[in-house]
Image: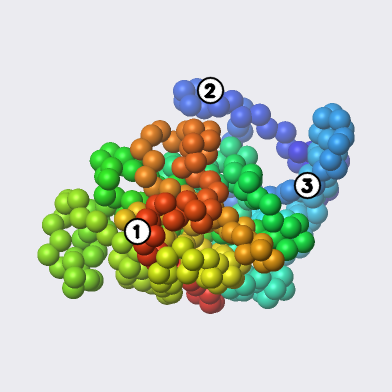
Amino acid sequence: VDVAGPGSTGAVASVEVLSAGLAAGGPTNFVAMDLKQAPASYRLDVVAYLELGLPAEAQAASAALALVAAAKRQLSAARALGGERGLSFRCYAPAGLDHAVCLPCSEDVAARARYHQLLRLPKVPLLLPECALPWADEPHSRAGGKLINPHLNCGPRPGWWKGSESTTRSVFIRGMYEYSHYMQDNTDDNGWGCAYRALQTSVSWYRMQYYTEKDIPGIQDIQRLLKRIDEAHKDIVIGSKKWIGTVEGMYLLQDYLGVECKMMYCQDTSDMASQVPQMLNHLATEGTPIMMGAGQYAYTLVGLCFDSASGEAGFMIVDPHYTGKDELKNITQKGWVGWKNLEWFEKMTEGGFINCCLPNAPRGSEHI
């Protein structure tokens, strides 16, 4: 970027990094610098909006002009605010805002508190340095290599939906999670590990929303935790194929992450249908995945589609019983992640009970 420095008539510097020479320890085009005389270091981060429908060349030119202008503004502000100390800018697209923002000093907790107040953001992790917008090819800093948000490929409503446009509402979890399922992590849990995997999916949500730096516990880690905190599992054999359920998932979320949870007990699918507004409200207010125990099976609910006029409901289900490779097309086309109706739950439960664990999204100054 050609940015003019103080007292200069052209660019501050034009540097080409000869990465091959640098990696080989050979000569590069970096010149020796007297660091005592070096100017303050500024970290700039800029973003631009482009008009849809423009030709590619026009979009590129528009983007270049907008980004250079933004960089100049940030550099000017950085010199005014940072002086010789230097200053960092980061771009964010926090949930609750309809546009991106570029903020200085977000590594400082007092600055973040002011931004939360000015932007009227909830007291949840939205403006941490790690929350800044990544480069296009950068993975999420807390990603573990599993599929992220596979439900986004399934559409905002079921393909079979017949509800009225005016009375239909679709709500999904906020943020990101990783899809955990059978046979991952070099562990053969086919036939018994579904609730462990649903719990891992939920824990991944808290990691990827920057509530915790704790690792996603493996199946044996979960068993060790249960052995310590749950009297009913004090004799569990670590490494066994012992089933767990939604209640145990709640215990783990409370102890491992310090997350408060609510349990919702449904006698059958008809009872669950009457509880859909409560589940819809949870997704809208808390935005966290719901762990579900349906008969002998465990699932994760990440979205709901509800017609208030007819009572029809569609459930976006992430199914941990999948045993194949993490191939998004195969997973969504075969319904391992996708929309389900009440009849599907009726079949899975054989008319039995459904338990749901609704974990809260913590709020407070300690989370900003």
Task: Kindly check if marks 3 and 1 are in contact, taking CB atoms under 8 A apart as contact.
Answer: no
Give the residue type that dot 3 points to: Ala
Gap between marks 2 and 3 measured at Cα: 32 Å
- Residue 132 lies in quadrant: bottom right
Q: Can residue 222 be seen in this view?
A: yes
Question: Residue at point 58% right, 66% down?
Answer: 280
SS category of the residue bearing label 3: loop
* Number of numbered discs visible in the structure rendering: 3
| Mark closest to the chain's N terminus, 3 or 1 | 3
In the image, taking residue 203 as reference, residue 12 lies left or right, namely: right
Query: Where is residue 246 drawn, in percent x and y?
Result: 35, 64
Residue hosting label 2:
20
Question: Residue at point 75% right, 57% down?
Answer: 165
Query: Where is residue 48 drawn, in percent x and y?
Result: 78, 47
Task: Kindly check if marks 2 and 1 are in contact, taking CB atoms under 8 A apart as contact.
Answer: no
| Mark closest to the chain's N terminus, 2 or 3 | 2
The mark closer to the camera, 2 or 3, is 3
In the image, taking residue 294 as reference, residue 233 lies left or right, namely: left
The mark closer to the camera, 3 or 1, is 1
Label 1 Cα crowd, 10 Å radius (few <14 / some 14-19 / many 20+)? some
State which quarter of the image contains the N terminus: top right
**Against 31, is 187 above or below?**
below
| The disc label shown at residue 295, or none | 1
In the image, taking residue 288 as reference, residue 195 lies left or right, namely: left
| Mark closest to the chain's N terminus, 2 or 1 | 2
State which quarter of the image contains the C terminus: bottom right
Gap between marks 3 and 1 measured at Cα: 50 Å
| The disc label shown at residue 48, or none | 3
Give the residue type that dot 2 points to: Ala
**Against 27, is 78 above or below?**
below
* Nearest the eye: 101 or 215: 215
SS category of the residue bearing label 2: helix
